[in-house]
Structures are given as structure tokens and as C-alpha cells.
Image: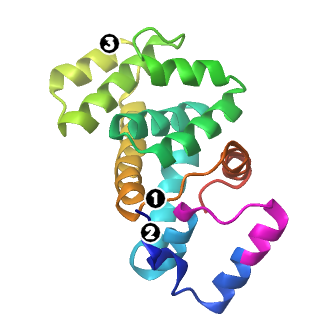
Amino acid sequence: MRLEVLDHGYSRGTKLLFRVIRLFSGHPVPDAARLVFYRPDFYGSRAKTFTHEAMRGPSAWSVGDRELMAAYVASVNESAFCIGAHSATASLSYQDAPRVDAVLADVDTAPIDERLRATLRMLGKLTREGTVSAEDMRAVLATGVSPQQIEDALAVCAVFNTTARLADAFGFELLDHEGYEAGAKYLLKRGYR
């Protein structure tokens, strides 16, 4: 059940921004954006900064790789909104929806680089179990992933474990295909600011 708190409590400026977004995009503002604007001093401003840095900051992982990590973490969490949003963004970034679908169906058989596969396995274990071992990290490093890439992947994992749980707690409204596509285009153009 969607919590109606996301429908109220915005400043006039934010309400105007939501109307402009709807006018130009043809779609209502997704609940993920509404949450960020709901309490910007408590959650939103910090979340935008951290998320943008994890997803668009300097990294050896491509934008598509990080969006795929977000979709994969969301799939482990069974968060329908986040799966839709980030699989659409990864698909658009890669220009390869079948690859994204294959990863979400079975990371072990998906047609992806072994470094990304090992990293996704590690993120999946961390998401499911809440812990990883030194052995898990050595397995990722053995594929050629750098320590910095592991840190970058862990940042994505932290962001989307939090976001997926918030999406489910607030009951984010699912979008149709066109809504997820519009969101993906926005995220690829502007990031998470």
C-alpha cells in the first residue's frame, strides 16, 4: 500500500517544479523523486549527493555497469519499483536490454565480463546475508577488479539497499514501460541531482 505522505508537505517551489516536470515529460513525478523532495533537510539532500557520487562520480565501472548493479541489488531485495527503474536505465545505457534481462534472470549464465559477474555475486551475497568474507573479496580481486572498483560497487550497493527498502516501505507506485523509459532518459542525462 502506497503511503499518502508523499502527496503532501512540499513547498510551493517544489509543487511548481513537479507541475513543470509533468508538463514536459508527460509523466507524473515518480515517488523516488517525491521522497527526495519530501524532507530535503533530513534525507533528500544527503541522499541525492551520495547517490549521484556513487552512480555518476569517477569510477572504472561504466554508468551502465553501476545501473546494472543497482538493478541487481533491487532484484535481490525483490523491489519492483527499483528493478523497473534501474533495469530500464542500465538497458538504455548499454543499448542492450537482453543483457540486463539475462543478468537479472541468472547472473551465473549471463553474457557479461567475469569481473562484473564476480562483483554482482559479492553484492548479492552482501544484500542477502548482510556480510561478506575476506575470501569473497579475494575471489572478486582475483578476476582483476581493483580495490577501488570494489569500493565503488559497495557504494552502489549501500545506496540501493537503502533505496529499495524505502521504495517498499513507502509503497512506491510502479510505472508503466513509458514511465520507466522517461525516467531512464532523465537519469542518463542529468544523473541523481
Residue type (three-letter) at the residue carrying disc 2: Arg
- Residue 52 position, x and y percent, is 54, 55
Quadrant of the rendered structure where residue 121 is?
top left
Q: Secondary structure at mark 1?
A: helix
Q: Is residue 28 magenta?
A: yes
- Determine the residue located farthest toward the right in the rendered image: 24
- Whole-number angstrom distance, CA of label 1 to CA of label 3: 28 Å
Q: Amino acid at mark 3?
A: Ala
What residue sits 32% from the left and 19% below the top?
140
Q: Nearer the viewer, residue 179 or 185?
A: 179
Residue with the mark numbered 1 = 50
**Mark 3 Cα shell of 10 Å, populated few (<14), some (14-19), many (≥20):** few
Name the secondary structure under disc 3: helix
| Relative image position of residue 63 (x, y in whole percent) | 60, 37
Measured from the top left, where is residue 57 in percent x and y? 56, 48
Residue at 46%, 58% in the rendered image:
50
Q: Nearer the viewer, mark 1 or mark 3?
A: 1
The residues bearing labels 2 and 1 have C-alpha atoms spaced at a distance of: 6 Å
Residue 171 appears in the rendering: yes
Q: Check residue 46 in the rendering and tell me which mark sits there, or answer none.
A: 2
The total number of labels drawn is 3
Q: Earlier in the sequence, mark 1 or mark 3?
A: 1
Disc nearest the viewer among 2 and 3: 2
Q: Is residue 186 above or below residue 109?
A: below
How much space separates mark 2 and mark 3, taking CA atoms? 34 Å
| Residue 144 is inside the magenta segment | no
Magenta range: 19-32
109 or 147, nearer to the observer: 109
Q: Which color scheme did the rendering employ for the protein?
A: rainbow
Q: What residue is shown with label 3?
A: 142
